[in-house]
Amino acid sequence: MTTKKTDAIVIGAGWAGSILAKELTEAGLSVTVLERGEDRATAVEGDYPTSIDELRGAIRHRLFQNLSQSTVTIRNTMDQDAVPYRRLAAFLPGEGVGGAGLHWSGVHFRVAPDDLALRTNVIARYGKNFIPEGMNLQDYDVTYEELEPFFDKAEKVFGTSGEPYTIKGKVAGTGNPFAPDRSDAFPLPAMKDVYSATVFKKAAANVGYHPYSLPAANASAQYTNPYGVQMGPCNFCGYCSGYDCYMYSKASPNVNILPALRQDPKFTLITKAHVLKVDLDSDGKKATGVTYLDLNTNQQVQLKADLVIISAFQFHNVHLMLLSGIGEPYDPVKNTGTIGRNFVYQTITTSRAWLPSKQYTNLFVGAGGAGVAIDDFNSMNFDHGPLGFVGGSPVWVNQAGVKPIAAAIGGPAGNAPTWGEGYKDAMVETYRHSLTIDAHGSNMAYRDVYLDLDPTYKDAYGQALLRMTFTWKDNDIRMNQYVVSKIEPIMKEMGATRYALGHLHANELFDTRRYQTTHLGGGAVMGADPKTSAVNRYLQSWDVSNVFVIGASAFPQGMGYNPTGMVAALAYWAAYHIRTTYLKNPGPMVQA
């Protein structure tokens, strides 16, 4: 075993890891980032035209995790045997430098302030008995006002395009009226609305809703961010989700942070480094470094450090904590422990409307983060009392660009034939004249939905796989059904010739065979109580004070918005407090 030393170790080279590495090198620390996958640079991965090969990208999943080496096992309920997730479908974790931040779409939200104290707000409005039995509703223990400067910083780094509503309390634009107040404008104007989004915006306003253009980490114009790296304007080619942007228009760690970070002599990037565990001292209260497997040589390496940042994908964070013995594993029967508790996903269903034959939606055009949304049924923006559920959904037309293979596999939907001339005619009509509307909603946490180590299956490195126990619950299904019912008036106002509403069904189980989102959360959640949270308000482990766990693993419950904006803000928030408080006096920053 080889032994090395550095000031700080960052595990994972995605958004969270890149942000922490940049902040810690600026603080004067030598930082080593360990990435399990390969190095990736836009000049190579984004090489045109190979970068927009749909077969190579979306079908063969070149930027995603290699499930033959490590995966998760999945079951719906505790009385079932979990089986390995062997084929990428429901969710698509990334692998390699950039992680999921390389292949994401670019929808870049902040957070609904009410969601940060959801338990408190629900009880204040509707009483404690409104929370269903078995639902683990929890506050974040941080406010929007505290996080706002870090949302602003992330948007400036990402080059986010958007339209504000209020800035410092004054109306400043025609953005989302439900959005929280901002300290500054978006760095770039909002992306242009494609035709389908324009039709949706007009119809939604006509039926009394409040449409706005989505905030997008797709550059609407040429941009240079605070780190001095440049972005080019998006050309709506439609190759965002699952692809490395050849235009340097979609924000990614590879475009927006790493070009500056790579120039810092205090920064070291080690790829093909699979972290096996975080090493702890004899009493398990302090991390001494990590042990990783060099996948090039198959040799174990012990890397020592005074500070360890776990900042991989959501469930990788939880998996590594369980393998390392950091914190107490969650036990759903005893309702004890925190590691693996409050695992959440995201509800999303898609409805389709067909427009008259003279209206062309041009589905091949698109940008991953662009579109038009309404927030009338998101978060606490509507009265839940008569409805009897917690949570909500934004509703949007997010035309990201439909590629040829996806269009053929997806088919024309509706009641069209499944083969032959009728199928072809219907598919052409769908591609030319239809649009989709998503209800992209929250998912609450429950006592019997969690992550733990699988007792049967191991990965290629001999370690137990992570086991995921998850399915949809009645609360989330009824929320989704209610929000989808509000889409129908919009479709009628559009003048749709026909439409098909997509929603979750009563008692529907989570199905891994159909893509939903890659927005997984929880498992190492933040909070004020170490009995129900794995990390404190600064994302510092309650149990091992020199370990910080950054990512969507900190979310106590799922939100309606995409998670990346919140992940980035929390990363900058944690980094700020590490720099200004922890490094001056290492130890617990919050007393249990």
Image: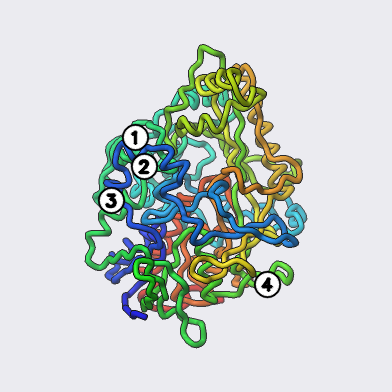
What is the image's colouring?
rainbow
Residue position for label 1? 234
Residue position for label 2? 250
Measuring from the top left, give residue 63's x and y in whole percent.
41, 49
Badge 1 marks a residue whose secondary structure is loop
Q: Residues within 10 Å of mark 2 (few under 14, many from 20)?
A: many
Name the residue type under label 2: Lys
Looking at marks 4 and 2 on the same chain, the residue that comes earlier in the sequence is marked by 2
Q: Are marks 2 and 1 in contact (CB under 8 Å)?
A: yes
Name the residue type under label 1: Cys
Name the residue type under label 3: Pro
Q: Residues within 10 Å of mark 4 (few under 14, many from 20)?
A: some
Mark 2 vs mark 1, CA separation in Å:
7 Å
Badge 2 marks a residue whose secondary structure is loop
Q: Residues within 10 Å of mark 1 (few under 14, many from 20)?
A: many
Measuring from the top left, give residue 558's x and y in whole percent.
59, 52
Mark 4 vs mark 2, CA separation in Å:
42 Å
Residue 108 shows in this picture: no
User: Which of the two residues, 407 or 422, is positioned nearer the viewer here?
Assistant: 422
Mark 1 vs mark 3, CA separation in Å:
20 Å
Name the residue type under label 4: Thr
Q: Are marks 1 and 4 in contact (CB under 8 Å)?
A: no
- Looking at the image, is 335 positioned above or below residue 496? below
Residue 226 — which label? Answer: 3
Q: Residue farthest to the front?
A: 420
Q: Residue farthest to the bottom?
A: 282
Looking at marks 1 and 3 on the same chain, the residue that comes earlier in the sequence is marked by 3
Looking at marks 4 and 3 on the same chain, the residue that comes earlier in the sequence is marked by 3
Residue position for label 4? 336
Mark 1 vs mark 4, CA separation in Å:
49 Å
